[in-house]
Amino acid sequence: MATRWDMIAAGREAVARGVKYIYGAKPRNGEFVTYSAAQIDALRDQYGSDCVWWSDDSKAGQLCCDCSGLITKGCGVLRGSSGFRVSATEDLPVSKVWDNWEYYIGWAFWMPGHIGIVSEVEGYYYALDGSARNSVHYAMPRQGWTRLLKLFDVDYDDESHEEEEDEVTPEEITQAVFAGINMQDFVARCMNAAPIAAVSNDGGDVYRMYEPKSGDHLFCQAEERDALISSGWKAEGVAWVAPAGGTVPVYRMYNGRTGDHLLTASLDEANTLYKAGWTYEGVPFFTAPEGADVHRLYNPNGGDHMFTANDGEKDSLISAGWQYEGVAFHA
């Protein structure tokens, strides 16, 4: 029987191999399958164009799967998302996952018409998340999960698995940044960000992004901005311009419980947050010891952090009840 770590391996493989979402596509003989144009047409004939979109034709010749197919890849049993729920040995409110995240690793997240896998990284899930996203390792606020399922087809008592990969710490990442190591490859061995912030020291526009479901703001550069827009984030324009050749890395941290992203140029703060359970999401850009002040503010009502180089916006947010936390770094 499959174990929780087989479920995690299925999620990791889907993300690593860039498996595409097509409704009705399933693994065969335990492997993801490359679908031809004719096979995609056959799925459309079977399920209709409301499920198998015409835009899915562009996925011909690529590995494809749907959300319940990912669960099948992990456990080896073919069911639909509703079938996995009906057969589950435990069916709990999704909020229970926060009681003991480690205990629920490899269980299934469920909502009507959709199913995913509880990640080994707190606050995250694996899924084939639909044609706009495909295979993802995303933070929970990006999906409206309602249930937590202990799958009948998985042996959750098998604890023989030992992680082969070492934990990546902010200290290691900082060293790698200055050594010129490709951060996408380096941080990927933890699979602890989606998308992982790609390090660039070329400077340029830093964009402010807003996630309507969670109310979170995130700051990034152009390549990541485009990926986030395709995942449902809203672009709110250029927040400031990062200096080229900056010497101070800005760390991005994520709180899986609250959905909040935070930027800090302090390695000590990044370490403190990391040890407190925040997820490290890389270095989205560098800054300099001097330059325009970038202010940090906190919303005690929504739990969101905001960063702005605009003094007028800073004052407006303070007037609206945001707490001022000082100058975060310089642009």
Image (cartoon, rainbow, N blue to C red):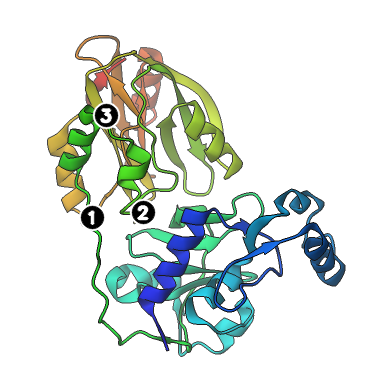
Residue at the (36%, 74%) spot, across then down: 5
Is 189 displayed left or right of 133 in the figure?
A: left
Q: Residues within 10 Å of mark 1 (few under 14, many from 20)?
A: some
Q: Quadrant of the N terminus?
A: bottom left
Tag 2's secondary structure? loop
In the figure, is residue 326 to the left or right of 35? left
Q: Mark 3 sits on what residue?
A: 180
Q: Residue at x 71, y 62 (%)?
A: 35
- Considering every residue shown, the one lying at the far right of the view is 45
Spatial CA distance of label 3 from label 2 is 20 Å
Give the residue at x 48% y 75%: 74
Number of marks in the rendered image? 3
User: Can you identify the residue that label 2 sits on?
Assistant: 191
Where disc 1 sits, the SS reads loop
Q: Are marks 3 and 2 in contact (CB under 8 Å)?
A: no
Q: Amino acid at mark 2?
A: Met
The amino acid type found where label 1 is placed reads: Gly
Give residue 53's position: percent from left, percent from top: 78, 55
Pinpoint residue 231: horizontal percent, then vertical percent. Answer: 57, 45
Disc number for residue 277 = 1
Q: Is residue 194 visible?
A: yes
